Image: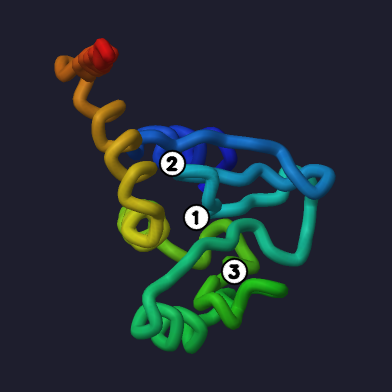
Amino acid sequence: MNVDWLREVCLSFPGVTEQIQWGNDLLFKVGGKMFAVTPLEPASVCLSFKASPESFAELTERPNIIPAPYLARAQWVALQTRDALAAQELAQLLRASYDMVFAKLPKKIRETVSSSKSAGRKLRPKKPAKAKRKRSR
């Protein structure tokens, strides 16, 4: 796993944006909520992402995977080495992280993200409101 591979995977999900925050951390977000973070400079962890409660318990028992600093209570895990997980498994876990964060977004934001992923579908403009008739006295 390297940053280019990570960007390719995360940006392939609908409505994902990336942002550098907290100095040199690259965040991947959907609907303004982050689902994965990687430092761009050497650090004690190389990637953090949200996990389901079951995955969190299973993953943190594996070598080189720990509860994410500052985010463990929200069920985030952190990889201490770039090879802690196979690429295929990591891609699936990143998609699961995206899906969990997406599911918690407000309905209006989910609909906006969903409509942006279907390229052929255009939003119809709203019909203008009818003017009220004035009563004659």
Q: Residue 125: tell me if it is visible.
A: no
Position of residue 73 relative to residue 1, above or below, is: below
The image quadrant that residue 53 belongs to is bottom left
Q: Nearer the viewer, mark 1 or mark 3?
A: 1
Q: Are marks 2 and 1 in contact (CB under 8 Å)?
A: yes
**Given the image, on which type of amino acid does mark 2 rest?**
Cys
Q: Which mark is residue 35?
A: 1
Element assignment for label 1: strand
* Farthest-out residue, left: 120
Q: First in sequence, mark 2 or 3: give its number.
A: 2
Q: Nearer the viewer, mark 2 or mark 1?
A: 1
**Given the image, on which type of amino acid does mark 1 rest?**
Phe
Element assignment for label 2: helix
The residue wearing badge 3 is: 78
Q: Are marks 1 and 3 in contact (CB under 8 Å)?
A: no
Residue at x-position 35% and y-position 84%? 54
* Farthest-out residue, right: 23
Q: Which mark is residue 10?
A: 2
Q: Nearer the viewer, residue 81 or 103?
A: 103
